[in-house]
Amino acid sequence: MHAAPRRTAVTVLLCAAFALGATACGPSSDDAKPAGPFGDLSGSQIVDKAFAATKGAKALTVDIDQRAAAEPIKAYLSLDSRGRCAGTLTTGATDTVELIKPDDKNVYMRFDEGSLREQVKDEDPETQKAVIKQLKGRWVKGSVSDPDNKDMLELCDPKQLLGGFEQGASGIEKGAETTVGGQKALALTEPGKGGESSTVYVATEGTPYVLRIVTKGGEDPGTITFSKYGKPAEAKAPAAKDVVETE
């Protein structure tokens, strides 16, 4: 039984959520440089600065809500530069996996019953029953280096999570100043094809972190919110009695 569910869905999420820079690679063509919290920086320059700062954050929390009609995905994960990560990933309506990555070697996952049934759906009834009985409510220990865990663990690394962003994206327009989670922010929007658009909200006070990305229209609309910058992830390995090693 593989430890990481529905890797394709996670990959789709990453590609869709960060379309803001993935499809535009040319130099900035912003001619207007209105005054504001970032002075004469263009929209492209501000976004480049924000993504660089976010990739370099020592710790943060990521809240993902991708509302694709085929398979919605939600994730809430705290992660830090020490390689620790903890949170949940829900695919579809109810299938949820809890994840704890306490170091660079091990990852622990606890599947709800819906996820367990999805994992063993091709097995015979007796095997399904035995697996669910063994794993329900318990943590499955796996290796960070296991290819089956790779795509899920990309959500635990800011550099990989934001890896699809291309610097120097053109056509990014400065929008209104607003607030996100009580923090002052500037909205910057890149229009896409077929009515799709992506807006990134950048903190205007302190470090210019990305606070939120909103994708509208297209096949994979959704929101990713970044918060709790600097707060280390609480990712302690579960008690041995609650762990099942499948290797």
Image (cartoon, rainbow, N blue to C red):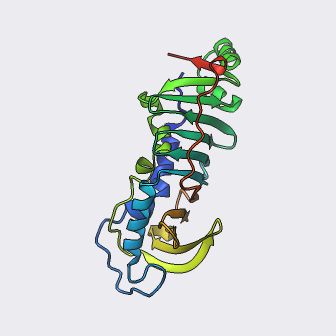
In this view, 13 is above or below 134: below
Give the number of callouts: 0
Residue shown at the point (61%, 47%) measured from the top left: 76
Residue 71 in percent (x, y) is at 60, 46
The answer to which of 192 and 35 lies nearer the viewer is 35
Classify residue 178 by image quadrant: bottom right
In this view, 223 is above or below 153: below
Q: Is residue 224 visible?
A: yes
Residue 110 in percent (x, y) is at 63, 29
In this view, 126 is above or below 31: above
Classify residue 98 by image quadrant: top right
Residue shown at the point (47%, 51%) measured from the top left: 58
Residue 18 in percent (x, y) is at 46, 58
The answer to which of 131 and 219 lies nearer the viewer is 131
The answer to which of 145 and 198 lies nearer the viewer is 145
Residue 233 in percent (x, y) is at 57, 43
Q: Is residue 71 visible?
A: no
